[in-house]
Image: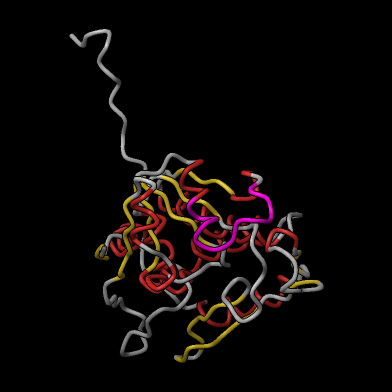
């Protein structure tokens, strides 16, 4: 029996913080899969050349980029301050043309349609739903939160803002994509008692029925060609680097 003075055991808290993208590639989902809590970084400025409202799918055997229109898009406003232009019919028709013969089209299309066809057009909320709904579809429970809810103010930027989120969430480990390795300092996190790790997706291949596998497409492509168990297996195919 524990003594009255013995401190209760605390569990490690691994978190990731990333801008909410619209049905991003599987590496994004792998990062969310690998952590205890995923924080949508929705209170930072919109970036026009990024993947917030665009991605790629397989169309007629080739990689094809799609873009979802946003009303009055501006890099001077936060992601959470933007609204989609609600032109979802064109996007859904594109998905039908691209994947109507895929083996898991019906289930995957139902997921996509239910995500985009609703009254909520806020970019941050819609994009977060495109990630959370995939985990629900796969039967995987995760903790999700939004940076906007933390009311971090306007002063903290970049690494300092992420460090403050880690502090608020009592994180013991912060995880980022391998592409962000140059953005963060191990010493800065170590001084806060936080381990810094990066996720490196493995080279993935699955049957697309078009010959060689076209990599790094939207998760939409994975869901069209892989069943639930296959997709869950792919989520675990990564390594961690310091």
- Which residue is located at x 69 percent, y 60 percent? 117
Q: Nearer the viewer, residue 44 or 146?
A: 44
Image position, residue 206 (x, y; %): 30, 76
Q: Residue furthest left?
A: 1
- Which residue is located at x 26 percent, y 63 percent? 242
Image position, residue 8 (x, y; %): 30, 21
Question: In the rendered image of this protein, does residue 73 appear above or below residue 211?
Answer: above
The N terminus lies in which quarter of the figure?
A: top left
Q: Which residues are magenta?
A: 152-163
Q: Nearer the viewer, residue 27 or 93?
A: 27
Residue 159 included in the magenta stretch of the image: yes
Residue 116 included in the magenta stretch of the image: no
Image position, residue 133 (x, y; %): 52, 53
- Applied colour scheme: secondary structure
Image quarter of residue 115: bottom right
Question: In the displayed structure, does residue 150 sit left or right of residue 59?
Answer: right
- Which residue is located at x 28 percent, y 60 percent? 236
Image position, residue 137 (x, y; %): 46, 53
Question: In the displayed structure, does residue 91 sit left or right of residue 238?
Answer: right
- Which residue is located at x 51 percent, y 87 percent? 59
Question: In the displayed structure, does residue 70 sit left or right of residue 98?
Answer: right
**Figure label count:** 0
Question: In the rendered image of this protein, does residue 195 appear above or below residue 76?
Answer: above
Q: Residue furthest right?
A: 72
């Amino acid at each position: 029996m524990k003594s009255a003075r013995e401190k209760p055991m605390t569990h490690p808290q691994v978190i990731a913080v990333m801008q909410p993208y619209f049905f991003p590639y599987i590496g994004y989902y792998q990062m969310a899969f690998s952590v205890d809590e995923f924080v949508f970084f929705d209170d930072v400025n919109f970036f026009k050349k990024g993947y917030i409202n665009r991605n790629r799918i397989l169309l007629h055997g080739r990689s094809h980029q799609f873009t979802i229109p946003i009303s009055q898009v501006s890099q001077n406003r936060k992601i959470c301050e933007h609204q989609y232009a609600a032109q979802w019919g064109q996007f859904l028709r594109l998905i039908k043309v691209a994947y109507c013969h895929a083996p898991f089209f019906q289930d995957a299309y139902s997921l996509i349609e239910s995500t985009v066809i609703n009254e909520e057009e806020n970019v941050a909320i819609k994009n977060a739903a495109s990630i959370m709904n995939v985990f629900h579809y796969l039967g995987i429970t995760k903790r999700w939160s939004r940076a906007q809810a933390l009311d971090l103010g306007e002063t903290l930027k970049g690494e300092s803002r992420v460090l403050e989120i880690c502090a608020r969430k009592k994180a013991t480990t912060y995880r980022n994509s391998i592409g962000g390795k140059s953005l963060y300092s191990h010493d800065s996190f170590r001084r806060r008692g936080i381990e810094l790790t990066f996720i490196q997706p493995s080279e993935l291949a699955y049957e697309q029925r078009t010959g060689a596998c076209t990599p790094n497409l939207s998760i939409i492509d994975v869901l069209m060609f892989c069943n639930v168990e296959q997709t869950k297996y792919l989520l675990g195919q990564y390594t961690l680097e310091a």
